Image (cartoon, rainbow, N blue to C red):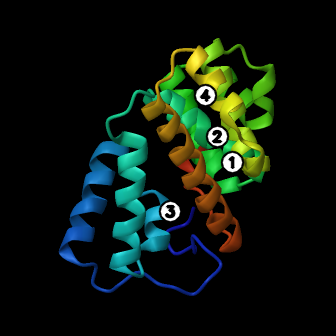
């Protein structure tokens, strides 16, 4: 993406100058990721919104959980696939490719997770996440029990629901503002 190209369709430029804590956060992203994710740039017009988004994201995706980082990224991709969220499919598809060291898995999850070779735990996690995305009102105790039967604890079920819920919200936001992924994500782990 060209340096001055907008990352969203709305005219919401970043704060000028960036507050010191935001600048420090962006510098950390550059150091660890080699990029500042466009989603963070999109939120950089308002410190409170950026902090709320990144705080919840970091807790759900990087915090302590019985779910692996790969499992959480897989949820992000499968939910984003149902919602057809371009930004999240590209960004989190890249993360799945990198974490799994399997570019084919990343592509399968983007297109149709049901064709991927998954273990039963992963399959049940993704089935639950899709049901939440398509028909959350139909979830009942039998759905939670299927997760318990593959060794997931109630805390894990909470985390599955939280990650799926977060991406259902962010998918809608990204689509509404036409958020564009960083070009680097397209090439990662191929």
> Which is more foreground, mark 4 or mark 2?
2
Q: Residues within 10 Å of mark 2 (few under 14, many from 20)?
A: many
Picture layout, residue 85 above or below residue 161: below
Q: Which residue is mark 3?
A: 39
> Which is more foreground, mark 2 or mark 3?
2
Q: Which residue is mark 1?
A: 80
Quadrant placement of the C terminus: top right
Q: Which residue is mark 2?
A: 77
Say whether marks 1 and 4 touch (CB < 8 Å).
no
Element type at mark 4 = loop
Q: Give the Cα distance between marks 1 and 4.
A: 20 Å
Give the percent coordinates (x, y) of residue 41: 45, 69
Element type at mark 3 = helix
Picture layout, residue 111 above or below residue 134: above
Quadrant placement of the N terminus: bottom right
Q: Residues within 10 Å of mark 3 (few under 14, many from 20)?
A: many
Element type at mark 2 = helix
Query: Is residue 92 in view?
Result: yes
Give the percent coordinates (x, y) of residue 2: 55, 66
Q: Give the Cα distance between marks 4 and 2.
A: 17 Å
């Amino acid at each position: 993406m060209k340096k001055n190209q907008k990352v969203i369709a709305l005219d919401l430029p970043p704060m000028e100058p960036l507050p010191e804590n935001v600048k420090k956060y962006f510098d950390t992203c550059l150091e660890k990721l080699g990029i500042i994710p466009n989603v963070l740039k999109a939120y950089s017009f308002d410190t409170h919104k950026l902090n709320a988004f990144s705080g919840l994201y970091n807790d759900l995706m990087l915090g302590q959980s019985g779910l692996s980082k790969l499992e959480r990224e897989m949820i992000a991709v499968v939910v984003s696939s149902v919602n057809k969220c371009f930004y999240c499919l590209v960004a989190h598809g890249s993360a799945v490719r990198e974490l799994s060291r399997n570019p084919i898995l990343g592509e399968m999850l983007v297109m149709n997770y049901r064709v991927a070779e998954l273990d039963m735990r992963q399959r049940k996690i993704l089935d639950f996440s899709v049901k939440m995305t398509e028909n959350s009102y139909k979830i009942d105790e039998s759905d939670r029990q299927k997760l318990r039967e593959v060794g997931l604890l109630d805390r894990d079920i909470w985390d599955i629901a939280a990650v799926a819920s977060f991406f259902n919200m962010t998918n809608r936001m990204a689509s509404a503002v036409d958020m564009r992924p960083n070009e680097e994500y397209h090439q990662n782990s191929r």
